[in-house]
Image: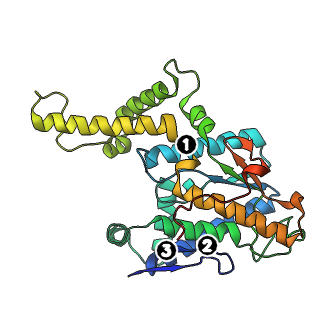
Amino acid sequence: MPKIRGRPVPDVDLEFEWNQGTWETLFNAQVALIREDIYRARVADRFVIYLSCPISGRGGSSPLVNVDIAQFTERRLMQRFGERVWILNPAQYQMESKEGTGLIRRHARAQGISDSDLERLVREQPVGGGDYMRMWTKILFEDTPIDAPTAKRLPLANSGRYFDAFYFLGPSDITAFFGQTHAGGTAGAVETYFARRYETDPDFRAAFSVSDVSWGSPLDAKIQTARDEWESLRKDLIRYYTLKASAAFSKGSHDEWNIALKINQRRLESTKGNVGELLAVYSDGVLVDLSDFDSGTYPGYAI
């Protein structure tokens, strides 16, 4: 089935391309579930922060590592801000994580789709970044019906009234995950992490497996080529998490930065310029200065 292009939220000028048919049905069910989670947080009178972070693999990164970093950062933010805060961690809902895959599988079963049929759908009609950004755009903007303390102060619908802040993952979060005290610095910490996880995690080892690689056999051209390929994968991962890992290198985070900007523009419009109602935006652990948040960034999956 061909993809469709359009605005996930009709009155917000952001367009994406996503899969129609079964995937759209499953993602709509995921939207409903996430809204229930947000609603429970609001009923508990908790502040809601959206965590923007890399999830899919790109530039040498690994989805398995990205999910672990997102979960670690979620716990770290809870420690920083306290139990009054609830973190909406997208890694919990995307198929790069076991949790996200499990939820999609549950929605599929509710639609009468077997696990084998879902696996075939994944192979034949892969989910793309546009599918996820359609989902997150709807979650972040749409807020009717609304049950949030900000509702009366922000009369304009679809201005992110469920949310209190965005947090964009930065280099300091990566350093905290891999450890700040390693004698070899961040690169040494990442290298140690790779070696340990490659040895103990079958899924991680499978992700970095190379056909024809052999460590005990005498070297020939074929084995040497396989070893070089494996070493290249390892070095790419170390390079990425040492120098690049942050929201700055995530296509989805680029779109989410622009979403946060548009939400604040709508809030200013809604309150006739009341800056006190602006969404708080954090990046790399610090509140973003207003002068750094005056314009958008290069889009990720947005068309």
- The residue beneath circle 3 is 17
Residue 59 visible in this rendered orientation of the protein? yes
Q: CA distance from mark 2 to mark 1?
A: 28 Å
Please tell me whether mark 3 or mark 1 is closer to you in this view. Answer: 3
Instruction: Give the SS element for disc 1.
Output: helix
State the residue at coordinates (79%, 73%): 146
Mark 2 or mark 1: whose residue is earlier in sequence? 2
For residue 155, side relative to residue 24 (left or right) = right
Please tell me whether mark 2 or mark 1 is closer to you in this view. Answer: 2
Instruction: Give the SS element for disc 3.
Output: strand
For residue 216, side relative to residue 264 (left or right) = left
Q: x and y percent of residue 170 in the render?
A: 61, 42
Q: x and y percent of residue 213 in the render?
A: 19, 37
Determine the residue located farthest toward the top in the rendered image: 183
State the residue at coordinates (50%, 79%): 5
Quadrant of image for the N terminus: bottom left
Q: Is residue 255 placed above or below 154 in the rendered structure?
A: above
- The residue beneath circle 2 is 14
Mark 3 or mark 1: whose residue is earlier in sequence? 3
Give neighbour class at mark 3: few <14, some 14-19, many 20+ (Cα, 10 Å). Answer: many
Instruction: Give the SS element for disc 2.
Output: loop
Which sits in the foreground, 4 or 269?
A: 269
Identity of the amino acid at label 1?
Ile
Q: Is residue 4 placed above or below 134 in the rendered structure?
A: below
For residue 218, side relative to residue 128 (left or right) = left
- The residue beneath circle 1 is 69
Give neighbour class at mark 2: few <14, some 14-19, many 20+ (Cα, 10 Å). Answer: many
Q: CA distance from mark 3 to mark 1?
A: 28 Å
